[in-house]
Amino acid sequence: MSAALHPRQALFEPEEAVPPALPVCDHYSGVEPRMTRSLELQAAMGPVFDVTLDNEDGAPAGGEVEHAHLIASLLGGRLNRHGRVGVRLLPWGHARFAEVLAIVLASARPPAYLMLPKPRGVADVAAAAAAIDAAGGAGVPLHALIETHGALAEVAAIAAHPRIESLSFGLMDFVSAHRGAIPQWAMSADGQFDHPLVVRAKLEIAAACHARAKVPSHSVVTEFKDPAALREAADKAARLLGYTRMWSIHPSQIQPIVEAFAPPIAEVDQAIEVLLAAEAARWAPIRHREQLHDRASYRYFWQLLERAERTSLPGAPALPADVRERWFAAPPAAG
């Protein structure tokens, strides 16, 4: 009998688009001490979260170029141990966009991704992508913030752009773009899940990403001293709205976000049982605990295990050692 197929070989077509396996937390920082502290945390915890160094909101007005040099030095520095550090650029059309971009791309280590803030639509994304590629950044994945009316109206086209890896929702700018028509409470940890216009925007972003195998990243929770509010928001983002990634703006938010986006232990155990039984049946339909399963549920459970692996914190692996060795120790063989 031939060797057992790896789940990714058995359950997915070779040409099928698969979302990038990004960490579930994207931690933003822009002030030098906080950027350094964020990189220290990532070096200690491992690449269970990304760090985004912010050249848009983090730079003082008029100091964008100097801030870009600082970011480039941190990108290429000793604290960037895992290669999971990205950069938020200036908006496309900013007078210093090209200069800041050149400085960032000249770093000793390239960014893991570049975030494009405030695109007004797919034309801005395409123009920024072309400029990045021409500047030598063709190999750097692009993320974009959906925070304007134009970007939301064209979110499907933006998600379909081949250079885009992930889309984030920019809650604060989106609310501000409504010129007072959306009340301030809609930016709170609770309110952003209640106001219909905000929820509509979140759902459209998530749906566009999933339809095109891109990663939807949820907006911030500004109440960083309220861990219960953060956990509830992260849980809603992951369980109700279909987000697979979320922003952090304070170090205390990182671990709760990672934990909220991790699948429950009982579901991980169920997934392992089903997939082992499916593998033994050579991926044919099975009956397990009086439930029928086939490739549709196998795919679901495999993706759940992949998320469990991405959210494993140091000293607390989400998967048993034998499962990690069986399916995650090395990429599946070709063929």
Image (spheres, helix red, strand yellow):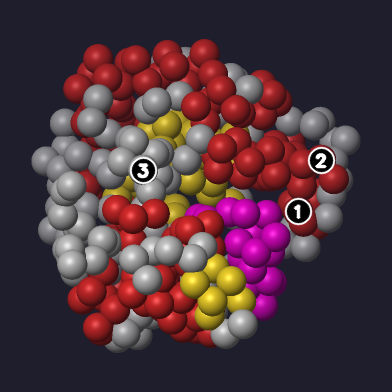
- The residue indicated by pointer 1 is 192
Separation of marks 1 and 3 at Cα, in angstroms: 38 Å
How crowded is the residue under tag 2: few (<14 C-alpha within 10 Å), some, or many (20+)? some
Residue lying at 34% horizontally and 36% vertically, measured from the top left: 15
Mark identifier at residue 58:
none
Tell me if label 3 and label 2 are in contact, CB under 8 Å: no
Give the SS element for disc 2.
helix
Indicate which label's residue lies in the foreground, 1 or 3.
3
- The residue indicated by pointer 3 is 13
Give the SS element for disc 1.
helix
The disc, 1 or 3, on the residue closer to the chain's N-terminal end is 3
Indicate which label's residue lies in the foreground, 3 or 2.
3
In the rendered image, which quarter is residue 71 located in?
top left
Left or right of 4 in this view: 231: right
Q: Amino acid at mark 1?
A: Gln
Identify the magenta region.
Answer: 227-251
Residue 118: where, in percent of width, then height? 56, 28
Image quadrant occupied by the N terminus? bottom left
Q: Is residue 21 visible?
A: yes
Left or right of 289 in this view: 186: right
- The residue indicated by pointer 2 is 197
How crowded is the residue under tag 3: few (<14 C-alpha within 10 Å), some, or many (20+)? few
From the viewer's perspective, is residue 255 above or below residue 26? below
Residue lying at 46% horizontally and 76% vertically, measured from the top left: 274
